[in-house]
Image (spheres, rainbow, N blue to C red):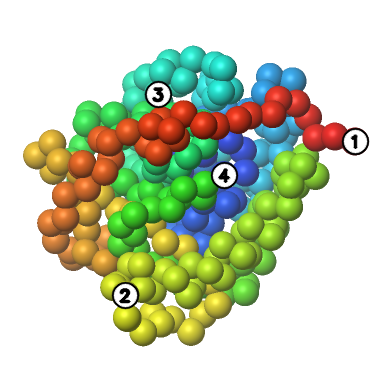
Amino acid sequence: MAPTVLHIAPHPDDEAVGCPGALLHLLDRGWTVVSVIASLGFEEQWGRRRAEAEEAASRAGFVPIFLDPPLNLDLDGDLALAVRRVATELPAIVAQHDASLVVSPSPHDVHHGHEAVGRGVQRAMAVLPPTVRWWMWGVWGDLPAPNIFHAFGARDLDRAAHILDAYAGELERNDYQRLLSGRAAANAVLGSERVFGFGSPAASTLPFADVLTEVRLIDGRFMASEAHTLDEGPFPDSSFDRDLTPWLDSPSVHEMVGYIREVHGEPRP
């Protein structure tokens, strides 16, 4: 049976922005990619955003799952409830699909909805099998200790852009295609040194990259794997000897500072 990865997207389009190169890499190597869409944005957007997410999954070759009802990740919503729902509902989805890998934003990704989903995944890890690995990406907030570097070329960037193009309503509001290509290009340069150490030579000549943080929960501690590329295999032999629990358990910057805004509504005509 093909191995399965579960990607938890706080909003439709996050699966096309968070680490699309890495997900497509797994897909191309025989993995089943299950795309869990946790919310559908503001309630008046639900129909549009679900249709866009279904089209995106079709383009990607992912298996879509929608939490029912969708999480309310509004800034004035019950974010604590959203965290609890992810923590309690995710283990059953992992078991149903026999997933060995969970991918999500980190609990420090600045956006309140991303952080709620990340916190929920962090709690779910406590009841998942200890062999399950957790990959975290950062879009709104940088990862402080990335340990996976995945370089990719223009073909895979075009595939990710085609998936992202399904989200016409979101692209009307902001040019996330520029984010997709610009972030991937920056990761190709900065990621080599951030993952393998400052002063390291470029890890690849390919023009784009994803960077992620991989951990397993071992004896109650979130332990990070050694730095590696996905070309070594998704699950290389690796020691998990760096304790990232203090970072994961700490309050996020936005929680400490308390400054965050949200604009409610559909894109302007």
Nearer-the-camera pick, 99 or 138:
138
Which residue is at 62% across, 59% downward? 180
Q: Residues within 10 Å of mark 4 (few under 14, many from 20)?
A: many
Q: Which mark is residue 211?
A: none
Kindly identify which residue carries mark 2.
198
Nearer-the-camera pick, 111 or 8:
111
* Residue 173 x/y as whole percent: 77, 42
Of tags 4 and 1, which is closer to the observer?
Answer: 1
Q: Residues within 10 Å of mark 1 (few under 14, many from 20)?
A: few
231, above or below 91, in the image: below
Distance (Cα) linking label 2 and label 4? 29 Å
Kindly indicate whether the residue at mark 1 contacts the one at mark 3 (C-beta within 8 angstroms): no
Kindly identify which residue carries mark 1.
269
Distance (Cα) linking label 3 and label 1? 34 Å
Distance (Cα) linking label 2 and label 3? 35 Å
Q: Residues within 10 Å of mark 3 (few under 14, many from 20)?
A: many
SS at mark 1 in the image: loop
197, above or below 161, in the image: below
Q: Which residue is situated farthest in the right direction here?
A: 269
Kindly identify which residue carries mark 3.
83
254, above or below 213, in the image: above
Q: Quadrant of the C terminus?
A: top right
- Of pointers 3 and 1, the one earlier in the residue sequence: 3
- Of pointers 4 and 1, the one earlier in the residue sequence: 4
* Residue 7 x/y as whole percent: 45, 43
Q: Amino acid at mark 3?
A: Val
Of tags 2 and 4, which is closer to the observer?
Answer: 2
Q: Amino acid at mark 1?
A: Pro
